[in-house]
Amino acid sequence: MSQATNQSWGGRFSEPTDAFVERFTASVNFDQRLAPQDIQGSIAHATMLARVGVLTDDERDAIIHGLSEIKGEIERGEFEWSVPLEDVHMNIEARLTDKIGITGKKLHTGRSRNDQVATDIRLFMRDAIDVIEAELVRLREGMIGLADREAETIMPGFTHLQTAQPVTFGHHLLAWQEMIARDHERLLDCRKRINVMPLGAAALAGTTYPIDRHVTAELLGFERPAENSLDAVSDRDFAIEFTSFASILLMHLSRMSEELVLWTSAQFDFIDLPDRFCTGSSIMPQKKNPDVPELVRGKTGRIYGHLMNLLTLMKSQPLAYNKDNQEDKEPLFDAVDTVRDCLKAFADMVPAIEPKKASMFEAARKGFSTATDLADYLVRKGVAFRDAHEIVGQSVAYGLKAEKDLSEMTLDELKQFSATIEQDVFEVLTLEGSVAARNHIGGTAPDQVRAAAQRARDALAAIKGEAQ
Ligand code: ARG
């Protein structure tokens, strides 16, 4: 055997790996990020092997001590990563053998890199999800808090981006909160299926050693060992589920971003974003650009890309492990970082949104936003809804010509269209009257918004309670 072949698997080879192939197949440049999880998994594996008598207690202790030192070397940036050693797993194992000699070579007993990497990536994703969940909770709390404060603030509600009916700003914020609440459920659901342990599947068929997978699962905090060894080493559904969650989340954040960008424009003028979330222009001195929401909107593309990447990666792969799977890491890592940063940006920014109430109110007065209220008023006076619709349509046509909102017309002007209209019509034509009248669960009335905010807070507290 040539000395130049890989020390971990070179035994059957008669020539060294081609230099390009060595670089092409190596993953250490990116999978070194899994080092903490790799060491955590190895410590649990060695502990279990000693428990069942495959390693002596002294061997276990030497391995754990060596791995702990390696962890320190990596954290301090002293560890020398080697591309010829291919990946994070073999780099750490080789260093362990350097340090503790032949005992280091016993660590890999009863395991393969196939179940090892599948375990590492699940541990990594579990940790990442917990960080992401904390940002998501912070964002939900921020939305609920602002909604409560803005329960009475009136703005135009839109359909087709045309003025539709007045709504409260708090109601709009709670609509956002509902989107994120569903994302939260999807994230926790994905975490359940991540928290299953592949270790013990070995290369694909299991191992001949008397391993106890329940012990390892418990040491690593997994819910249970994976049921089938072939599936355990090949399954990457969780990566697809996570990027699906991330895609839907970013789609939501991009919708919110789009609204924030519109609202900060001089034409809408609904809100101000504090300067710390904006940047200027190098040529136009007056500019204050909403870069943060714009960038979140832009980052949606890369997340969709990662989902397509992973779906395609897994398509048509025969059982069990294939080297293709090495390609799961970069999209996952980038998805984790992007989601975490976008959520952080939003969680910091949302509570700092400053509504320009007078401007929102003025906008809600334009575009005949209380037309439906007038129709409902006529129905209450006994007019059939379709006839009421027609009457109000004529009133609006008149208003467009006369340049008057419905609430600005005199009673006589309104009576031209229906004799049933009386003085009390002006109560329903005000914006305050319009929103207050939508007073049922899910409606925009300020009282309903405050009640919905409280329910949202309770639902969030219940989820947090469950997690503890
Ligand atoms: N670097 C590999 C990966 O990320 C580790 C597993 C390799 N297993 C193998 N039999 N080549 O998937």
Image (cartoon, grey):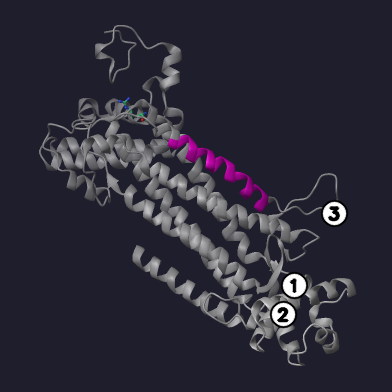
Determine if residue 89 is in view: yes
- The answer to whether residue 78 of the structure is visible from this angle is no
Element marked by disc 3 = loop
Residue placed farthest to the right in the image? 402
Q: Report the side of 358 relative to 113 (left or right).
A: right
Q: Quadrant of the C terminus?
A: bottom left
Give the residue at x 53% y 74%.
442
- Residue at image point 31% right, 34% down: 234
- Using the image, tell me which numbered label, if any, was put on residue 286: 3
Residue bearing mark 2: 431
Residue 16 percent across, percent down from the top left: 35, 9
Q: Amino acid at mark 2?
A: Leu
The residue closer to the viewer here, 390 or 458, is 390
Check contact, mark 2 vs mark 1: CB within 8 A. yes
Q: CA distance from mark 3 to mark 1?
A: 27 Å
Residue under pointer 1: 364
